[in-house]
Amino acid sequence: MTRKRFLAGLLGLAAAPLAGRLEADEPDAADGRQVPRLDKPKAEWRRLLPPAAYAVLFEESTERSGSSPLNAEKRAGTFVCAACFLPVFRSDTKFESGTGWPSFWAPISGHVATRRDFKLILPRTEYHCARCGGHQGHVFSDGPAPTGKRYCNNGVALRFVPERESLPALRS
């Protein structure tokens, strides 16, 4: 084990009590219901997903900047979680952030959950799919109006569904 990895692990352990649990943003429906949680063993997710998507979604890895074709996606449609297919973003909230990752100024209400991340020492807010818990990316306060937020997403954690196509059925 390298010294850097050892120190990062210690920092992670020290920050774990501060990180807390995932907190859903807003209720999904007008009646206040949250998105029902889908719990699958990691071994099953590993079997269902390509290795790069599994690494990002369930090991909280990050894809290389500029590597996702979704960064250039401009068509109308919906971006769904690559693991469970829950719709996460609408294309009309996507913007060019210049970061090399697909970026959005707002998720679909109630479809992401957040928690504090101390992996780079300074706290950041990471967000996950509210249904399967798959890691999507981090949210920053340097986005455009109307929210001022930038949801910086890993492209391999999403699938794009063009407007005229049916959304895939949610995985069970």
Image (cartoon, helix red, strand yellow):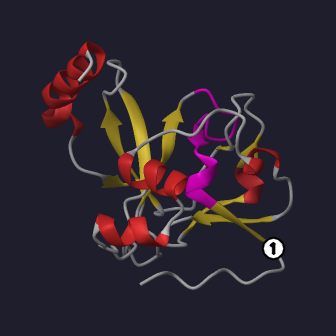
Q: Is residue 172 above or below residue 112?
A: below
For mark 1, give the secondary structure. loop
Crowd tier of the residue under label 1, counting other residues whose Cα lies within 10 Å: few below 14, some 14–19, many 20 or above: few
Q: Is residue 17 above or below residue 88?
A: above
Q: Nearer the viewer, residue 136 or 31?
A: 136
Residue stretch rendered in magenta on the structure: 142-158
Q: Nearer the viewer, residue 49 or 107?
A: 49
| Residue 156 forms part of the magenta stretch | yes
Residue extending farthest to the top is 3
Inspect this view and state whether residue 137 appears. Answer: yes
Q: Residue at x 54, y 29 (%)?
A: 141
Amino acid type of the residue that numbered disc 1 sits on in the rendered structure? Glu
Relative side of 91 to 61, left or right: right
**Quadrant that contains the C terminus:** bottom left
Q: Position of residue 109 (x, y in %)?
A: 52, 62
Say how many tags the image has: 1
Q: Nearer the viewer, residue 32 or 157?
A: 157
Relative side of 4 to 169, left or right: left
Q: Position of residue 18 (x, y in %)?
A: 18, 33
Q: Is residue 156 above or below residue 20?
A: below
Q: Nearer the viewer, residue 76 or 68?
A: 68
Q: Residue at x 22, y 17 (%)?
A: 7
Q: Residue at x 33, y 73 (%)?
A: 37
**Quadrant that contains the N terminus:** top left
Inspect this view and state whether residue 131 appears. Answer: no
Q: Residue at x 71, y 45 (%)?
A: 68
Q: Position of residue 160 (x, y in %)?
A: 71, 64
Relative side of 13 to 42, left or right: left
Q: Position of residue 155 (x, y in %)?
A: 64, 49
| Residue 134 forms part of the magenta stretch | no
- The residue to which callout 1 is attached is 163
Residue extending farthest to the front is 1
